[in-house]
Amino acid sequence: MLESIHSPASSLSIPELLEASRRLREQEPNLRARDVADRLGVSEAELVASRCGDGVTRLEGPWPALIESLPELGHVMVLTRNDSCVHEKKGTFANIEIGGVMGVVLDEDIDLRLFLKHWAFGFAVREESRGRWLQSLQFFDGDGRAVHKVYLTDRSHHHAWSGLVGRFAAPVQSPLLAIRAVEEPLPLQLEDDAVDVTGLRERWRRLRDPHDFFAMLKQHKVTRTQALRLAGREFARPVLNTAIRTLLESASSDGLPIMVFVGSPGVVQIHTGPVRNIKVMGPWLNVLDEDFNLHLREDHIVESWVVRKPTPEGHVTSLELYDVRGGQIVQLFGKRKPGVPELEAWRALADSLPDQESSHA
């Protein structure tokens, strides 16, 4: 199954887009760029590109070389989001390894998995936001969705900014983008009664690395949520959609270090460590710590699962949240390293989360 999420190409001319954006920002100054773009019926990348030459510089790869230059900026804030969750982390780029279209950044604070085939457009952006001037590098998929952003902080090496941008600036600073619909390769899903459930469960039992999970889905032609449903309670159980709030508040109270994974098409961004300041603001569940922020739309959560995957050191347990399309919103683990059993306190916390069925008791 192939599904296009955003329709490409705007019907507005560049001058019309700039004027409409200006008026909307005057009326609602707290709107973020993504929301402005949605209101105007364009992609976020088109909105950013329309300002080329006025605070925006269009960048050109090669993206691996640009990413390998990011340590020059020193302390930065990185942002990765999907439709339901924003993950912000402060730190420095280090231990970068890129091969082909795949890469990793393995610093203690900035921990990323990179999928560079989704890095179609890049821009250096200077913009005012809530009374502050921000400088950032912003990267987008072919359909104009943001895949990753890197913001300067007060502790960044600001003197390195212009040199880095100059090296990777595109020779033609056009405000026009060749936006295209991006086909997302969702697993070719079988109907439930056509799935070899016994084989799926046997394959699940043979997992030795959580990274092999996607290959298992592909082999059995099932989606993630379908696999969770069919695998049975040995491997997965549905829990209340309030489980994420319970888990974060308990981890904060106990000082329990956790891992929080949020992905866009082009990046999976990971926080490892404690979470302290948990705040609810309307539909948003937030972690508001000094070096880590998480902003989650609780009203977008349609399914929540506690999932177990075997490893040589014993099973690892995760809490996984899914949206109405079956897309993964966020995934949480206890802090762990390969070759080390997961924390007993994390396993106990995950196991204590109430079953979904208990809401009907």
Image (cartoon, grey):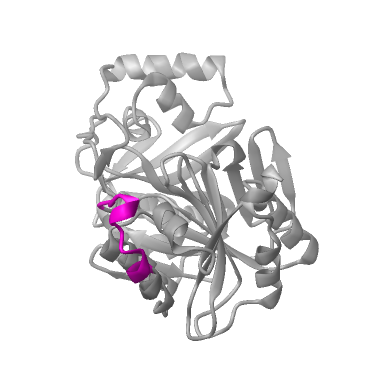
Left or right of 29 in this view: 40: left
Q: Position of residue 96 (x, y in %)?
A: 39, 70
Left or right of 326 in this view: 87: right
From the image, which quarter does the N terminus lie in?
A: top left
Q: Residue at x 68, y 43 (%)?
A: 360
From which residue to which does the magenta span run? Answer: 188-200
Q: Residue at x 67, y 46 (%)?
A: 242
Q: Is residue 331 magenta?
A: no
**Quadrant of res 55:** top left
**Quadrant of res 251:** bottom right
Q: Residue at x 28, y 16 (%)?
A: 12
Q: Is residue 195 magenta?
A: yes
* Whether residue 2 is visible: yes
Q: Position of residue 70 (x, y in %)?
A: 41, 61
Seen from the viewer's position, the closer of residues 100 and 261 is: 261
Q: Is residue 85 above or below residue 230?
A: above
